[in-house]
Amino acid sequence: MGAAGSKLEKALGDQFPEGERYFGLENFGNTCYCNSVLQALYFCVPFREQLLEYYSSSKNIGDAEENLLTCLADLFTQISSQKKKTGVIAPKRFVQRLKKQNELFRSYMHQDAHEFLNFLLNELVDILEKEAQAAKSDQETSSPPEKMANGPKIAQANGSHKDPLVTWVHRNFQGILTNETRCLRCETVTARDETFLDLSLDIEQNSSITSCLKNFSSTETLNAEDKFFCDKCCSLQEAQKRMKIKKPPHVLVIHLKRFKYIEQLGRYKKLSYRVVFPLELKLSNTVEDAESEYSLFAVVVHVGSGPNHGHYVSLVKSHNHWLFFDDENVEMIDESAVQTFFGSAQEYSSNTDHGYILFYESLTTNNKS
């Protein structure tokens, strides 16, 4: 990698971003699913900054027990504080902790990068919530009695306090979907909100992210055995339902459902469909109908023709340069090369490198709140 590292430095020359580090990650026997996602998260700058900040402020605690969050923070700190600009790091502690934590990732089988991302983000949220809870109960036990008798605390006890803790992981990745169901008899609209950390989209051949998002929000009629129980009519009624994005996240993670269960085959098949993902994305299926603009900064790519084998790599945009991360190897690529990962227009193609998880960052500053 020494040679490749210096090659990257030569390629960037005096354009090498000040203070930035480009390090490959060692593969511990099929851990490319993990490496590709970690690179995408490392170059999600707001997430990286908040993680490093968390690490430096919690380091003072000293005796904090090791968990996935501390291992990830430790790895990111290790990368960002390297003296060299390029090289290779072994994410050994993180991978060991991951395997200890979840038996799904213990085998040397081919793992799913999306399952890993999902597990990781939810695990980080759990750890932060537990820490906040512990800090809160410590505060309450150590606070003077008059503070406790102040009144508002009672509201929480009877369940009316529904605001869950919003962690910095939520602030980066969480959006809100609203599920609207309209009774076709009385026209009453029932809306139910749900949060999401990523959107999983069904894909079609020769389509685009925009058309996949339109399909995601298309109206579906509930009839026959799928009728909807309308509270106003007090009976089962035909209805129309659709999903809309109520609050777009600051970082929009889109998972393309490339692995589909085929009943006749009795197994999963990889869909190599060509799905165009733009460098700049406009989200228009939001409740407010205000367009949210996003810029692509990372793509996790699945390489291979089937779901149970293959390889993961990632493309990352950093300081206006695109980089290609393949475990230990890091190289510069041209922005135009990103389109070679859209997928194949024909079913049997020699190109098996397909965009699988897309990371977009909001260009609208008010999403940062």
Image (tube, helix red, strand yellow):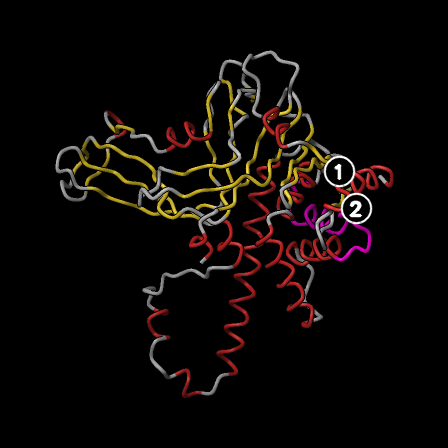
Image quadrant assignment for residue 158:
bottom left
Q: Is residue 104 magenta?
A: yes
Residue shown at 29% from the left, 30% from the top: 219
Picture disc at residue 86: 2
**Disc 1 to disc 2, how far (Cα)?**
9 Å
Q: Residue at x 15, y 41 (%)?
A: 234
Q: Nearer the viewer, residue 1 or 28?
A: 1
The N terminus lies in quadrant: top right
For the point 57% across and 45% down, the residue is 119
Residue 163 lies in the magenta stretch: no
Q: Which residues are magenta?
A: 81-105
**Which residue is painted at 49% across and 43% down in the image?**
252
The kind of secondary structure element at disc 2 is: strand
- Does residue 48 appear anywhere in the picture? yes
The amino acid type, in three-letter code, at marker 1 is Val
Residue labelled with disc 1: 330
Circles 1, 2 touching at the beta carbon (< 8 Å): yes
Residue 104 seen anywhere in this rendered image of the structure: no
Q: Position of residue 254 (x, y in %)?
A: 50, 37
Q: Neighbour class for label 1 at 10 Å: few (<14), some, many (≥20)?
A: many
Q: Residue 303: image x %, image y %?
A: 66, 26
Residue 52 image label: none
Residue 167 image offset from top left, x and y in percent:
51, 59
Sooner in the amino-acid sequence: mark 1 or mark 2: 2
* Nearer to the camera, 62 or 313: 313
